Amino acid sequence: PWNSLSKEQIKFSKDYRMVPIALINGKQVNGSGVIIDTLMGANEKSADESKWCSWVDDHLVHLLPPNIYRTPGEAIQAFDYITTNSGDFSLAQQYAIRYSGAVIMYFIAKRAKKKYNLSDNARQDLFDALDTWAGVGLGGAKF
């Protein structure tokens, strides 16, 4: 389980202190896109694949926190799920992670709405983005 307060699971990484991090064949790989590319092999992406991978990194990912942590209650609910479905946290750690994480992520989500110029209805922004991806990105193909 990931302890977001102590970050003890990534102490091995001296230069990169964020997640995700993967150790693939003994090599540290940082960031979702690079991890996926490494796992999928050295195949070149098409221009269209590169475009949509960039769209996910530059647009879609910023819509997630305002949707997961919309209210303080939803933020606590998200962290409650994280802490109770991982048996490796002590009761004190569960409370610390649940409440401090929820407060921090609630305010990060609010800041993200302003920073990325999202509307007051973050859920509709997410639905619109997914409709764009499904319609234009997939071009009618099944996913």
Image (spheres, rainbow, N blue to C red):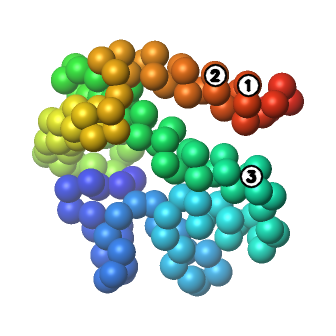
Q: Badge 3 is on which residue?
A: 49
Is label 3 in a helix, a strand or a loop?
helix
Closer to the chain start, of discs 3 and 2, is 3
Closest to the observer, 88 or 26? 26
Closest to the observer, 2 or 127? 127
Is label 2 in a helix, a strand or a loop?
helix
Residue at 78%, 33% in the rendered image:
138
Left/right of residue 115 with respect to residue 29 in the rendered view: left
Determine the residue located farthest toward the right in the rendered image: 141
Q: Is residue 29 visible?
A: yes
Q: Badge 2 is on which residue?
A: 131
Disc 1 to disc 2: CB gap under 8 Å: yes
Quadrant of residue 87 in the image? top left
Closer to the chain start, of discs 1 and 3, is 3
Residue at 66%, 31% in the rendered image:
133
Q: Residues within 10 Å of mark 2 (few under 14, many from 20)?
A: few
Closest to the observer, 42 or 44? 44
Q: Type of residue at label 2?
A: Asp
Q: Is residue 54 above or below residue 70?
A: below
Q: Quadrant of the C terminus?
A: top right
Q: Residues within 10 Å of mark 1 (few under 14, many from 20)?
A: few
Q: Is residue 28 above or below residue 97?
A: below
Left/right of residue 23 with respect to residue 116 in the rendered view: right
Q: Type of residue at label 3?
A: Glu
The numbered disc on residue 1 is none
Q: CA distance from mark 1 to mark 3?
A: 15 Å
The x and y percentages for residue 85 are: 40, 37
Quadrant of residue 2 in the image? bottom left
The x and y percentages for residue 21 are: 47, 67
The x and y percentages for residue 3 are: 29, 55
